[in-house]
Image (cartoon, grey):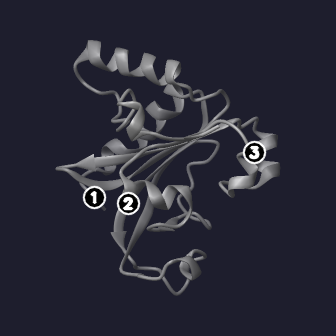
Amino acid sequence: RSALDPILRPLAEAALHACAGALARVWLVGPGDQCRACAQSPHCPNQERCLHLVASAGLTQRLDGPFRRFPFGHGEVGHVPLTRRPFVVNERLAGLGLAEAAWLANHGIVAFGAWPLEYGGHAIGVLAVFACERLDDRRLGQHQRRRDRRKRPPFPLAGAGTAPGRRRRIE
């Protein structure tokens, strides 16, 4: 257990509400500890470190299942800590392999965002949200303005409101 544990679930819940989300999840960097039983091990060439699912809010709070670990560099979530750039997509989610097409349709998911979590200049994890509304600059900008007025972040959406060159976007 980490010293961050008490804030991880509230972080996921805050992201869920800020982004009109259906599911928000937090992964933190950890050791390659379940490689033999991990569904993602075929995509993990290194098996020394990976992303560990540590918090979930919304449709499920479960921390097990096939996405409990993400190899670095695999899929969009796995690329975020390497590039340290957000990934936001508002269409064609089913084709990206982020989730099953039926699950996306059943829950009205139209957008996905993944943001790097950083501390001390290092990527320590990923915050991701499956949203029922578009994740556009206006929505993310409103969040940034609220955060600026309060002078304390309700959750650290690293990269939200940054220069356009820092954000990867597929539309």
The label number, if any, that marks residue 104 in the structure image: 3
Q: Mark 3: which secondary structure?
A: helix
- Which label's residue is closer to the chain start, 1 or 2? 1
Mark 3 is surrounded, within 10 Å at the Cα level, by few (under 14), some (14 to 19) or many (20 or more) other residues, namely some
> Which residue is at a point 69% across and 58% down the rendered structure image?
97
Location of the C terminus (image quadrant): top right
> Which residue is at a point 56% across and 26% down the rendered structure image?
136
Mark 2 is surrounded, within 10 Å at the Cα level, by few (under 14), some (14 to 19) or many (20 or more) other residues, namely some
The label number, if any, that marks residue 82 in the structure image: 2
> Which residue is at a point 35% across and 33% down the rendered structure image?
155
Q: Mark 2: which secondary structure?
A: helix
> Which residue is at a point 64% across and 42% down the rendered structure image?
59
**Which residue is at the far bottom?**
36
Mark 1 is surrounded, within 10 Å at the Cα level, by few (under 14), some (14 to 19) or many (20 or more) other residues, namely few
Residue hosting label 1: 2
Eye-nearest disc, 2 or 3:
2
Q: From what the image shows, is residue 108 above or below residue 33? A: above
Eye-nearest disc, 1 or 3:
3
- Which label's residue is closer to the chain start, 2 or 3? 2
- The quarter holding residue 40 reads bottom right
Indicate the amino acid at tag 3.
Leu
Q: From what the image shows, is residue 63 above or below residue 23? A: below
| Front residue (pair 42, 168) | 168
- Which label's residue is closer to the chain start, 1 or 3? 1
Q: CA distance from mark 1 to mark 2?
A: 22 Å
Q: CA distance from mark 1 to mark 3?
A: 31 Å
Indicate the amino acid at tag 2.
Leu
Relative image position of residue 102 (x, y in whole percent)? 82, 50
The label number, if any, that marks residue 130 in the structure image: none
Relative image position of residue 31 (x, y in whole percent)? 34, 74
